[in-house]
Amino acid sequence: MSLTLKAVIVDDEEPARLLLREYLTAHPDVEIVAECANGFEAVKAVGEMKPDLMFLDIQMPKLNGFEVLELLDPAPFVVFVTAYDEYALRAFEVHALDYLLKPFGQDRFDEALTRVRERLEKGSVPSFAPLLKDAAAQRKWLDRVLIKDGSKVHVIPVDKIDYVEAQDDYVCFRSAGKEYLKAQSMNDLESLLDPARFIRIHRGYILNVERMARIELYAKDSRVVILQDGKQLPVSRTGYQRLRAMFGGEV
């Protein structure tokens, strides 16, 4: 880590960004390398600038702060900036993460920055995986999938997904004739998808049942699902039982 900290400010409200910039003038060893008004800009800036530190608002349109973190690998050290949010504050405390609760003054900001320096010097950069897991658990079911592709971010509403296929350490989302790869396990993804809409029809496939046209016998005790676009997917015995249960045995 260099003596000068490179910092990125992320907040959708300009007055909030101006305030952080003002507070940072008291810290000449911190260089602001980017200011971002939304999560998409933040993902791009972190990828290009490789900052040491990010001041990250949680409540933002388009992508919230947790979704930004999901797309960063590796992520810089983060100080979360948030208005009152009981869940978020409890999660930050549980996982020993640094945060600033709006509104905050120069003294509280300076205190947070001092703590950041100490932790960076010790090399104690926290893992955000437990926080992201908790954030995901707060949602009943996933409503969209975020996929980073170079400097681009694809946002796929789950109702636009045709099916998902396992590919080694990745899952491949098929949507509107296009394929999108994401580093994720099928088991983790399955637990996030609404089981009233998505069925694990095979160890390697999760199907959006709204795309299913019919099921056909392929060989003895072997079946395939025919999608509305003609695509065929294998169905395991367990998968077939799940489909029968969903449709009251009428498949």
Image (cartoon, grey):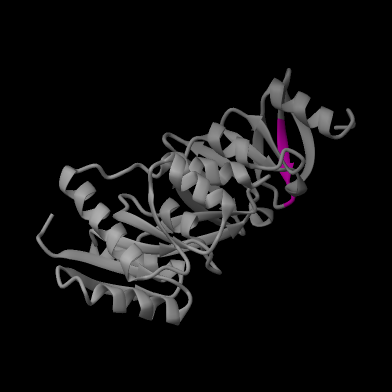
Vertical comparison of 133 with 180: above or below: above
Image coordinates of residue 190 in percent, x first then y, are: 61, 36
* Foreground pick, 144 / 21: 21
Q: Is residue 8 left or right of residue 243?
A: left
Image coordinates of residue 221 in percent, x first then y, are: 73, 18
- Indicate the quadrant containing the C terminus: top left, top right, bottom left or bottom right: top right
In this orientation, does residue 183 appear? no
- Residue depicted at 63% across the width and 38% down the height: 206
- Residue depicted at 77% across the width and 48% down the height: 210
Q: Is residue 130 left or right of residue 59?
A: left
Q: Which residues are magenta?
A: 224-228
Vertical comparison of 201 with 94: above or below: above
Task: Report if residue 5 lies within the magenta region.
Answer: no
Residue 14: image quadrant is bottom left
The residue sitting at the top extreme is 220
Image coordinates of residue 139 in percent, x first then y, are: 64, 47
* Foreground pick, 172 / 156: 156
Residue 160: image quadrant is bottom right
Q: Is residue 251 left or right of residue 61?
A: right
The residue sitting at the front extreme is 107
* Foreground pick, 218 / 4: 4
In this orientation, does residue 8 appear? yes
Q: Is residue 12 left or right of residue 72?
A: right
**Main SS of residues in magenta:** strand
Vertical comparison of 116 with 83: above or below: above
- Residue depicted at 23% across the width and 57% down the height: 114
- Indicate the quadrant containing the N terminus: top left, top right, bottom left or bottom right: bottom left
Image coordinates of residue 245 in percent, x first then y, are: 83, 28
Residue 99: image quadrant is bottom left
Vertical comparison of 188 with 110: above or below: above
* Foreground pick, 238 / 13: 13
